[in-house]
Image: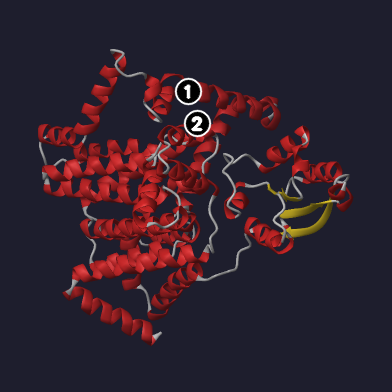
Amino acid sequence: MSVIKSLITQTKRYSAVQPQHCIGMLVAISALVAWRIIYLQHGWVNDDSLLYFEVARLLADGQWQAAYTLFPWLLYPALLALGHLASGLDIHTTAQVINIALFSLFSWGFALLILQAGGTLRTMWWGGLLLLSTQYIVGDILGMLLRDEGFWACLTWALLFMLRYMQRGKLPDAYYFQVAIIIAMLFRLEAIVYFILPLSILVYQAQPLRQRLHKSVHAISIPLCGGLLIGAAVTTGIVEVAHLGRLQEIIYLLKQGFIERLQFIENKADLIGDQALGHHLANYGNFAMWSLLVLITLNKTLKVAGWPVLLGLIAGKKAWGHIHHQARQLFSLQLIVGFATSLLIIINAFVLSSRYVIASGIVMLVASAFCVEYLYKKATIWGKRGLLLVLIGMLFANLYDFGKIDLDRLAVEYFKTINTRQQPVLYDTENARFYAHQPFLDRIPSSEFVESLLENGKISDYDYLMISIADDHEDYEQSVKRRLSTNFEHIHTLYGWKKKTKVLIYRKRMTNTAG
């Protein structure tokens, strides 16, 4: 423990003299952590990543129309394609390099945002430790090679530019903010809602209302002009709504989609009232339904940055006053907008991945850095040691190789050992096909793919079969076993974590092969 204390003391002394070097060190450490997290994946890729890889491949081959048809939001796949063509690396490796670069850019903006909000370099280091020790953002999501890291980076820099604009009033910061949000939109469409953030300027009572309105309009001038031009083009028929890409989703929601979703929720509420609450409480079906949606969204938002962050925000709430007052206004509005956006997502899709609430988690991490620094100053020597041990332990847990089982990769490797004559193999998942360098099949579900081959008889074209069985698909497993038993024999089973998932390995019966 004395070694840790000595290291912290030396870092404080050095950072007091060299602040830019201190920021650079945090960014470098973040890059190393990102590299380690990606290394721990051992080549595993997320299902969404496979879509981006295929779009990038099409772009690199010059098949722009096919790429746009497959996935119309092209910035991230275009980055992969450009990196692939410029470096000569394969698309998977290019994605890993870009992932590290985007996370480093995010960490840089995150560090500057803490300092701009009134924090010291010590606060920045606490924020960095909190960020890198998050079990979900860094431990789970960072290694998935998604476009999310680009969204985090651009949104964080947008918050930084917005805060600078609120504090200094320099016009370039307003335009930097808008450009950052536009780029964030090109990573994830929902970033468009954060054009609302300049409204936080209106809360600042120290300036005349006219000046605040003037500053707010400047901060949204690009989307205002862009919206007017697009609206005029659509109205006059110069541009069709069908040519607006994923912006059509917003138009659809505003015109009729949202009303349809509200009706869908109304039907669910009636179901809850009739079947769950009963006759006497049936009128509370709507209340119960909306309460559930709000509580689910709130639960995911509070948990996304991790329990240490949430507990730090609660226990160190006196440190909220240490945050610059304009930063508090901006962060409060960002949390409100983020929560409202998450609620809209769960209303529209009736599902809410924790990935979609990370925007709120970023602000919670910034605020928590002030709170944890305050708690550390007030804690006893044992309290300080305990706090450091918890966060450092969580960081090392992120960096430890737990040897997670990747069933798809295991299956591919197993077939390499038994299929020495390179006979046709059916890989029923997109991940396995990726590892085996087979064509992309638009992420068709495994069971649907196998069922279609059984129906049309083309399953007999393969000499080996990989059949993936999820934990709750026992009926599917029994059906497949029965239908394959005539022409194929089950030769091996591969199991996933705690045997919750498995892969059945089949080989065509020798008599059929001979005949």
Q: Would residue 505 be found to the left or right of residue 69 on screen?
A: right
**Measured from the top left, where is residue 188 in percent x and y?**
39, 41
Residue at image position (58%, 44%) is: 439
Residue at image position (36%, 52%) is: 83
Kindly identify the amino acid type of the residue bearing the numbered disc 1.
Answer: Gly
Q: CA distance from mark 2 to mark 1?
A: 8 Å
Front one among 272 and 279? 272
Q: How many marks?
A: 2
Residue most extreme to the front? 515
Asked if the residue at tag 1 contacts the one at tag 2, i.e. Cβ–Cβ closer than 8 Å, the answer is yes
Q: Which residue is mark 2?
A: 348
Relative to 403, say whether 368 is above or below: above
Dividing the picture into quarters, in which one does residue 120 lie? Answer: bottom left
Q: Earlier in the sequence, mark 2 or mark 1?
A: 1
**Measured from the top left, where is residue 358 in percent x and y?**
42, 49
Q: Quadrant of the N terminus?
A: bottom left
In this figure, which colouring scheme has been used for the structure? secondary structure
User: Is disc 2 surrounded by few (<14), some (14 to 19) or many (20+) residues within 10 Å?
Assistant: some
Q: Which mark is residue 257?
A: 1
Q: Would residue 57 be found to the left or right of residue 436 on screen?
A: left
Q: Does any portion of residue 390 appear in the rendered image?
A: yes
Residue most extreme to the bottom? 2
Residue at image position (57%, 25%) is: 264
Relative to 284, say whether 475 is above or below: below
Secondary-structure class at tag 2: helix
Q: Which mark is residue 203?
A: none
User: Is disc 1 surrounded by few (<14), some (14 to 19) or many (20+) residues within 10 Å?
Assistant: some
Secondary-structure class at tag 1: helix
Relative to 218, say whether 10 is above or below: below
Residue at image position (15%, 49%) is: 167
Q: Would residue 112 be found to the left or right of residue 88 on screen?
A: left
